[in-house]
Image: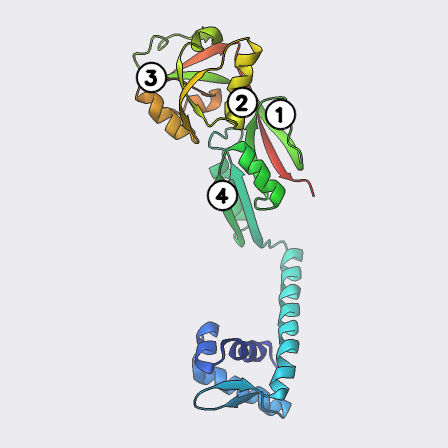
Amino acid sequence: MELQQMRYVVAVAETGGFTRAAERCHVVQSALSHQIARLEKELGARLFDRTSRSVRLTAAGAAFVPVARQTLQAAERARAEVEAASGEVRGRLAVGAISTVAAVDLARELGAFRTRCPQVRISLRTEMSDQLIEQVRQGALDVAFIGLAPGARTAGVRQKELSRGELVAVVPPGHPLAGRAWTRLSRLARETFVDFTAGSAARRQRDDAFRAAGLAAADVAFEVTTVEFLAKLVRAGLGVGMVPESIAAELTGLHVVRVRPAPERVERLVWSGL
């Protein structure tokens, strides 16, 4: 009795026919039928009643299939244990990240991980920090790279601080602040803003800085969810924006202006607290 013969029997039972079972197992039907016939001869009992219209399990077949499934599952578990013991890692890795992640070169790191663990299926999802934290809590993501204000809490997940930095202003060519090395936050507060969506962690970083400086809420005319779209709207002269200093240098066609006092930002790695 061989594992492959068991796979063929289970496939026929689940698909209801030899042709479909052969397609599932990627073998020609004659080879599948031959192996099942050999197994039936070894067992001394027919596993299927075959007619021109249907294939049904016999009583012996109905008794055999559940045990065959358990045997195949045990064989797969044994294979996985051996692969793990020999250093071969399988499974999935679901990663989340904000669009402004800068503490790590995420593309390079994921590429290196793929090289080390080619049997692991990697997926990446880009969202705002709050959504990523919730998806980690729910188990939809294994880890996430997020950006928050320094005092922000992330309940229900474990975390590690990766970096700290400041937000800077980005303005279009021809703007009165273009070419200046720095400006006061109170001067910037008079501008129309392109900013991230209200309530998001990225938005709160700037909002908190305005409140701490005793400034009124900014005039946010355009709300976005990605730094790329923010930069595009600023280039078009629709407003100014504030982004992490580490990201600003990558945004072509914009002028970077330091701000005092500058909003602070912390990047963290979060994962399940369970």
**Is 29 above or below relative to 272?**
below
The disc, 4 or 1, on the residue closer to the chain's N-terminal end is 4
Q: Quadrant of residue 174?
A: top left
The disc, 4 or 3, on the residue closer to the chain's N-terminal end is 4
Disc 2 is placed on an element classified as helix
Q: Determine crowd level at label 4: few under 14, some 14-19, many 20+ residues with C-alpha closer than 10 A.
A: some
Its colouring scheme is rainbow
The residue located at (39%, 26%) in the rendering is: 230
The disc, 3 or 1, on the residue closer to the chain's N-terminal end is 1
Quarter the C terminus occupies: top right
User: Closer to the observer: label 4 or label 2?
Assistant: 2
Q: CA distance from mark 4 to mark 1?
A: 24 Å
Nearest the camera: 235 or 247? Answer: 235
Numbered tag placed on residue 204 in the rendering? 2
Instruction: Answer with left or right where residue 54 lies relative to residue 135.
Output: left
Residue 253 in the image, given as x and y percentages of width and height:
32, 21
**Is 198 above or below relative to 52?**
above
Circles 1 and 2 in contact, beta carbons < 8 Å: yes
Q: Which residue is mark 3?
A: 172
Nearest the camera: 162 or 172? Answer: 172
The disc, 4 or 2, on the residue closer to the chain's N-terminal end is 4
Residue 2 in the image, given as x and y percentages of width and height:
60, 79
For badge 1, the amino acid type reads Ala
Q: Which residue is mark 1?
A: 152
Q: Which residue is mark 4?
A: 124
Quarter the N terminus occupies: bottom right
Disc 4 is placed on an element classified as strand
The residue located at (54%, 27%) in the rendering is: 201
Residue 47 in the image, given as x and y percentages of width and height:
58, 87
**Is 15 above or below relative to 217?**
below
For badge 3, the amino acid type reads Pro
